[in-house]
Image (cartoon, rainbow, N blue to C red):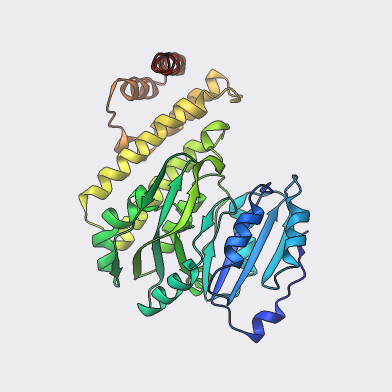
Amino acid sequence: MNSLGANKESMTQIKPIDISVLIPVFNGIKYIQRGLDAICNQSLKSIEIIVVDDGSTDGSSAFLDEYAQKDSRITIIHQQNAGAGRARNVAMDHAHGEFFYFFDIDDTVEPTMLEVACSTIRKYQAKLAVFGFRVTDGMATEDVVVPEKQLLSQAAIAKHYVSDILSVRHGSGFLWNKLYRGDVIRRHHIQFNHFKVQEDELFNIAYMKCIDSVVLMPHVFYTYYISNSGNSRSRFLPNMHEIIITVHQTFVELRHTLQIDDPRFHEFLCHRTFSALMLWVTFHLYHPDCPWTDKERKAVVRAVTDSPVWKVVNHPVGLESSLYAAAMTAGNVRLLGLYVQCFRYLRILKKAISHA
């Protein structure tokens, strides 16, 4: 059962809340202080901060409860571990703000971010604000600047979607460089699904299908720390192939909804999905923790190659993906496994030579 912190809903009835900042936390003890300080010190004060402790075991729970005593705008919710997506759903259920902002506790933001984003989205009466961000691994840093544009019709969104929104560099799958309207999410019952990866992108697609205006802001407000983030390649995900296919199909639905006729959309999506399936072969189908027998692997591969998506995206480029695709189409999982091993060894050898 969830347990709410000391800050109650009654305060939201006294003063309107501009933005609900929604934060899932799982074992984030190293970053909580920095992350919450960045949010609490925002120049926009009319915010509420809803933190869902997703079953942390590293002391985060107690730290959050103690920190919440410093600021009446903070509500802490404790729950058993269910994943970041479901934690965000719980946070949304308790949110009262006009706008929703999703923050990752291990990153940081500029102090004027919420104020500027809020004023901009209101100025243009837009349904979504997208802004730039900084990416760093602790050594190298890169600023990703979003072009300044106001897309105030569905036709304008369709025209610029590929170049200015779909691009990975502009973060089509990210939550933290966007400000959402709470009433859109509530009215259309938009939630995060049960997937452990790419649930953010599916949420964004569902949201995009319901709106007709987006404002793009050139400000670099968010700092994304690569080293702090979990890597879906490092753990075995038995349904990863289903997730990849679902994301592809959902993007196709979005294309129809927005009536996007830019041919680059199809090219981008096919390349992206095929590449994702090749990574699935390398990092999941033959993952050390994968419990499947060759018979079970063959059934899973067959489910992929029998899908309509495979028939659309199967256009390999290069030797490795060509061999993988041929073995998959033939249903020869032993040969496929041999290819995976060979290319793993080649990568290890190449890395060793480069460091020699």
Give coordinates of residue 11: x percent, y percent.
69, 80
Q: Which quadrant of the figure has residue 306?
A: top left
Q: Which quadrant of the figure has residue 3?
A: bottom right
State whether residue 118 is above or below residue 231. Answer: below
In the current view of this chain or complex, which residue is farthest to the bottom? 14
For the N terminus, which image quadrant?
bottom right
Q: Nearer the viewer, residue 166 or 137?
A: 137
Give coordinates of residue 307: x percent, y percent.
39, 37
Residue found at x 75% / y 54%:
61
Give coordinates of residue 7: x percent, y percent.
73, 72
Residue found at x 28% / y 24%:
318
Q: Tell whether 28 sits left or right of 141.
A: right
Q: Tell whether 293 sits left or right of 202.
A: right
Q: Tell whether 313 sits left or right of 98.
A: left
Q: Tell whether 89 sits left or right of 68.
A: left
State whether residue 8 is above or below residue 201. Answer: below
Q: Nearer the viewer, residue 276 or 255?
A: 276
Q: Is residue 318 visible?
A: yes
State whether residue 318 is above or below residue 58. Answer: above
